[in-house]
Amino acid sequence: MASKLTLQLIKAAKPRADRYTLWDSDLKGFGLRVNSDGSKSYALKYLFEGRQRWHTIGKHGSPWTPDTARTEALRLLAQARAGIDPEEAKREGARADLTVTELCDLYIAAARRGEVLTKFDEPKKASTLATDESRILRHIKPLLGRKRVRSVTADDIERFLHDAAAGKTALNEKTGLRGRAIVEGGRGAATRTVGLLGGIFTFAVRRKLRPDNPVQGVQRFKDKRNERYLSTPEMARFGAVLAASEAAWRAHEEAVAAWTAAGRTGRAPKLQADALNPSATNAVRLLLLTGMRKSEVINLQWHQIDAEHGYLRLPTSKSGAKSVPVGETVLAFLAGLPRLAGNPYVFPGQIAGRPFVNLGKIWERMRERAGLEDVRLHDLRHSFGATSASSGNSLLLLGSILGHRDPKTTQRYAHLARDPVRTAADQVSGLIATALDTTVSETDVLRPVSPLARSSRRSTRSRRPPR
């Protein structure tokens, strides 16, 4: 039975196993919902366009009392009679108040649930999500985070692009015990972050958080991704560093073995500066030999090596599960690596059963010794692609080796590939150049013939009797 909602009645309402509603006798459809956990909320049940709707006014307590909530219910009923759905108006108000920071949080949460798909119609991988989160944290939130989603314009996006390119979000701060975040900005970072913003606002349009995407039509900088390739002499310099490290490590192991055999008397042999962890040097060598990504090499396990058919069967990668073709050179190299009992990884780390994790730091020492401080680990993959393209392999074949799902990705090596038209032209030029350089005798040189002599010869041929 309905009773007028009062503070005394509400205070006396006790929770039950299931949620129930105390209806107000003064205003039809207005009531108090009592939840099983003891919380209480004012609500309104109403009809809109022939359908029953519920609208939560708010939790009992400041500012909502029986009287203020009843007044609000009257306003909502008047709104419904005027043709405006109170619940939809509430959602519209929430959308209007949503900030870019809150939108980014919704986007990342949806991506983690697999609701944001890539252009290959697959959920984003953890590594891609980590990159997205970093760009959101370091660039988007500092520059656009406080703006309302519905108020963002193309001018705001263009301003963001130029501010990020100019280094307005640059920082250098400590993260954790040993980590450090270094954000420099630049045109490449700005362009890629605006690309991410385009995806975030597409998500907002799908969720009806705004009617359009303000990123569309904004002209971005050309994304000149780092295309550093190692030349043959530079590869030789890295080879020398690898060889020196491997030799120093073997010498250290022999010294430790001799020291152990002698009863460990005296000081233990000291590791030489040239000696780098073999898991790191072997991983770098495989990066160069295969063009694989760092994560693919580091996480490679012994059972994934299909020596019979010449493939490395990777269950996951940036482009999904893939098989990396390898030849006898790589298979022989892998066969010669030691196996650590109880560790399934080809490049084991210091922790039992785990892969090697400090490749980045050791790489910095390697490239410094080689005098090539500008070379990144990922440039080894580019160098493999460049070597393949310049040796005559087709871009289609190269894309298959590198595991590119989008042919556009392989186009970065197009300018290095051998052009068959140029090759043919070069062959013809070579033949003619050879002929021009050929030494001939004086009697073989053709002498010019006068027009009179040429005419006389034709007359002579015409007077000859037929045979």
Image (cartoon, rainbow, N blue to C red):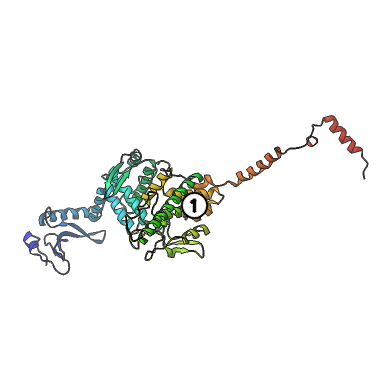
Tally of marks: 1
Residue 130 in percent (x, y) is at 33, 53
Residue 370 in percent (x, y) is at 43, 45
Is 361 on the left or on the right of 287, as rendered? Answer: left
- Which image quarter: residue 286? bottom left
| Label 1: element kind | helix
Identify the residue under disc 1.
407
Residue 151 in percent (x, y) is at 29, 44
Is 455 on the left or on the right of 253, as rendered? Answer: right
Residue 3 in percent (x, y) is at 9, 64
- Residue at 24% in and 55% down: 85
The residue furthest left is 8
Q: Amino acid at mark 1?
A: Pro
The residue nearer to you, when weighing 145 against 75, is: 145
Neighbour class for label 1 at 10 Å: few (<14), some, many (≥20)?
few
The residue nearer to you, when weighing 105 against 227, is: 227
Point out the image quarter for the N terminus: bottom left
- Which image quarter: residue 339? bottom left
- Residue at 66% in and 43% down: 428
Q: Is residue 410 visible?
A: no
The residue furthest bottom is 17
Point out the image quarter for the C terminus: top right
Is 190 on the left or on the right of 439, as rendered? Answer: left
- Residue at 41% in and 54% down: 251
Is 321 on the left or on the right of 49, as rendered? Answer: right
| Depicted 229 relative to depicted 440: above or below | below
- Which image quarter: residue 61? bottom left
| Depicted 172 relative to depicted 26: above or below | above
